[in-house]
Image (spheres, rainbow, N blue to C red):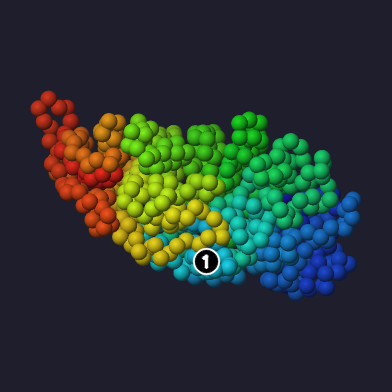
Amino acid sequence: MNDPSRPLGATVGPAGTTFRLWAPHASAVAVIGDFNGWDASVHPMARGEGDIWEAVVEGVGARAEYKYALDTAVGRLQRIDPYARAVTNSVGNGLVWDPEAFDWQGDDFRCPPAHQLVVYETHIGSFVASEGEPGDFSDVVGRLDYLHTLGVNAIELMPVAEFAGDYSWGYNPAHIFAVESSYGGPDAFKRLVREAHRHGIAVILDVVYNHLGPSDLSVWQLDGWSENGKGGIYFYNDHRSSTPWGETRPDYGRPEVRRFLVDNALSWLREFHVDGLRLDMTLYMRRIEAHGGDIDEGWSMMREIADAVRAERPDAITIAEDLQSDPAITASDGARLQSQWDARFVHPIRQAIIAMDDGARSLPAVVAAVTARDHDDAFTRVIYTESHDEVANGKARVPSEIEPANPTGWPAQKRATLGAVLVLTSPGIPMLFQGQEFLEGEWFRDTVPLDWERAESLRDLVRLYRDLIELRRNLGGDSAGLSGQRTDVLHADDHTKLLAYARVADADVAVVVANLSVEPRRARIRFPAAGAWRLRFNSDAGTYSALFTDHPSADVDARVRKGQPHPQAEITIGPYAALVYTR
């Protein structure tokens, strides 16, 4: 069953195509297509070991349309291949595809290590789009120069597996091996990955294994068998089938289904050269409901995927969206995924920057958010203030949450960028959501493209993000501390809302000072070492916005003063501003 030399699906060979399908309850199976007039009598398939049906059809090559015709206890059924690499549409036909035909032009890119990543979450259909139709992969290729200049070195794509219709977030996969046809299909996706790599940008892909569909599912009761009116061989057929998105949780206890999911995970790395996977809402892989009903097989399924990815591509990253702050997700005796989206960061930080009154900002909550970690590893978490979940379904973008009537005004600009500083200087893998850097005000919808005119009208704010990312990635060679494992809180005054912390990587240290108050502050704060500290970044600089006060912050000289155990320096900082110092 696990013989890699006998893959399921349609495999193109020198003389034709080999078709293989797992269908244990079918009494007969045939491959039908435009090459045989869709006649089930022409190319019958033979049942083999493990109830895998097989046929070799000579003369059939890439882009041929096909389906399977299955004789079952409930009659003749036609099904799209569960392993189809492309489909005409979600309810159309499968397309034979040759994964070896694409010219990668020597692509041998490797994903940067976790401590060097700066991630930009992107939705293909709305990143760049024309009126009346979704965007596609080529539209994103056209913006890679922009992303490279911004400085991000990874894009995380919301799911691109074929879904029902042309508009979707992508979390309703109908065919998990097929690339969404409205986005351009498999070769267009490969071109995006290849060109992203040429720009020094890794590609991390969202995959959905907690449920399938729930609509346009060819695997639903694939061979006619089911129990309790449920989904058949690919799904649980008891209470474990239930998810918030339908009765379509895969049966993680069935070896053939486990192979299906692991094969899918590896296909994105092998055939599409992606550099990592983000597993959607793993909470519903390991639990039936959010607050109970554990599925042990779901835990082992995550481990198997994580181990398979690590063995295939040791550089590739695996990320969970679990949002329960459970350290077992990244533990060696848990799910073994490399990192996870961190709810401990996003919620308190958003609250701190969105709150109308300074008195409602809890500095202890911010400190806890900044310093949280699991397994003594700063990079087992992904940190952000905006994601597709946080800016949709009734929740607005951060600037609109701050000032709905004027999301580009002074309060929105100041506090949104302050949140960005916390994201890009705190321990963890920082992530931005598309358009965040130019204060996109629309809440996320798959039918509404980004307002790219803002990228020009607010280009100085975009430069602020670019400068921050440059520091976070140590592109200037003197801010490596920002990618270090250690974080030391130097100053935290809940009365003045002034916070300072040091990020440390071996001998490299960076000091971050954040003022979560509308009042400018002057304060004496602790520094990690005596001597001169250079101001590398001031978010209140007038070069970033005509609305900013250009507060006169400056380099400082830290000294040990009488009666004080640590070096100190006096800093001045503007309202809702942040400073970054290095030695």
Residue 240 shown left or right of residue 456 in the figure:
right
Instruction: Please report the residue visible at 23 percent of the width from the left and 56 percent of the height from the top.
Output: 542
Count of numbered marks = 1
Residue 372 shown left or right of residue 305 in the figure:
left
Tell me where residue 76 appears, x and y as whole percent: 87, 58
**How many residues crowd around disc 1 within 10 Å: few (fewer than 14), some, or many (20 or more)?**
some
Q: Is residue 164 visible?
A: yes
Q: Nearer the viewer, residue 413 or 42?
A: 413
Quadrant housing residue 583? top left
Q: Which residue is mark 1?
A: 129
Residue 462 shown left or right of residue 558 in the figure:
right
Q: Is residue 43 depicted above or below 442 in this figure?
A: below
Instruction: Please report the residue visible at 44 percent of the width from the left and 34 percent of the height from the top.
Output: 374
Tell me where residue 6 appears, x and y as whole percent: 71, 57
Instruction: Please report the residue visible at 66 percent of the width from the left and 61 percent of the height from the top.
Output: 165
In the picture as drawn, the residue positioned furthest to the left comes out as 562
Quadrant housing residue 447? bottom right
Residue 403 shown left or right of residue 444 in the figure:
left
Tell me where residue 135 appears, x and y as whole percent: 54, 65
In the picture as drawn, the residue positioned furthest to the top comes out as 563
Q: Is residue 178 depicted above or below 117 in this figure?
A: below
Is label 1 in a helix, a strand or a loop? loop
Instruction: Please report the residue visible at 42 percent of the width from the left and 49 percent of the height from the top.
Output: 404
Tell me where residue 133 appears, x and y as whole percent: 58, 67
Q: Is residue 474 visible?
A: no
Q: Nearer the viewer, residue 473 or 555?
A: 555
> What is the three-letter code of the residue carrying label 1?
Ala
